[in-house]
Amino acid sequence: MQEFFNQGNKEFILWLKQQWNVEFECVRQDIDIQGSPERTLSRVVIENKGGNLFLLEEFLKSKFQIRKNVAKAIEVLNDNGLKQALLYQKSNYGEFLPVYKGTCFLNMSWP
């Protein structure tokens, strides 16, 4: 399910940095991602140079509005004290779902 993430794709690595200031170090294939993989095109846990982990999920652009609504709902829940729901990180441009080459991506800190 990690086929979208090509570690040699310098353009994508630069895009990650521009969107979320993620200084990519490696893909963490040793981490099992719980949940429903069928709702995404692909998903992967990545590690940055500081050792922080991030879950990166790729969605069809047709899923943009529903994923954006979910992201906003989780933000409201977090703002009101429910910290168990993983908060999606807005990009540096204030977007929950920036688009790269026709698909949109969500990013959240891994616990």
Image: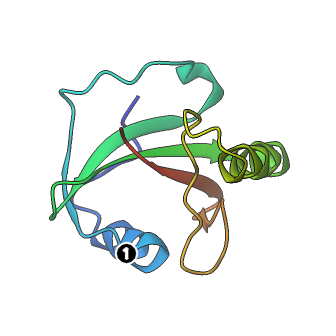
Numbered marks: total: 1
* Residue nearest the observer in this picture, 108 or 12: 108
Left or right, 72 with reference to 45: right
Side of 7 where 95 appears, left or right: right
| Residue 79 in the figure: left or right of residue 91 | right
Which residue is nearer to you in this view: 4 or 108? 108
Q: Residue at x 67, y 69 (%)?
A: 95
Q: Residue 66 at what x, y percent from top left?
A: 83, 43
Quadrant in which the N terminus appears: top left
Where is residue 30, by image quadrant? top left
Q: Residues within 10 Å of mark 1 (few under 14, many from 20)?
A: few
- In the image, taking residue 87 as reference, residue 28 lies left or right, namely left
- The residue where tag 1 is placed is 21
Q: Residue at x 70, y 52 (%)?
A: 75
Q: Position of residue 2 (x, y in %)?
A: 36, 35
Q: Position of residue 63 (x, y in %)?
A: 77, 43
Residue 84's quadrant in the figure?
top right
The picture places residue 10, in percent across and down from the top left corner, at: 27, 71
Judge whether 88 appears above or below 11 on screen: above
Q: Which residue does the image show at 31% across and 21% down from the upper left?
A: 32
Which quadrant of the figure contains the C terminus? top left
Q: Amino acid at mark 1?
A: Asn
Residue at the spot 63% in from the left edge and 54% down from the top edge: 103
Q: Secondary structure at mark 1?
A: loop
* Vertical placement of residue 18 versus 45, above or below: below
Does residue 21 sit above or below 82 in this rendering?
below
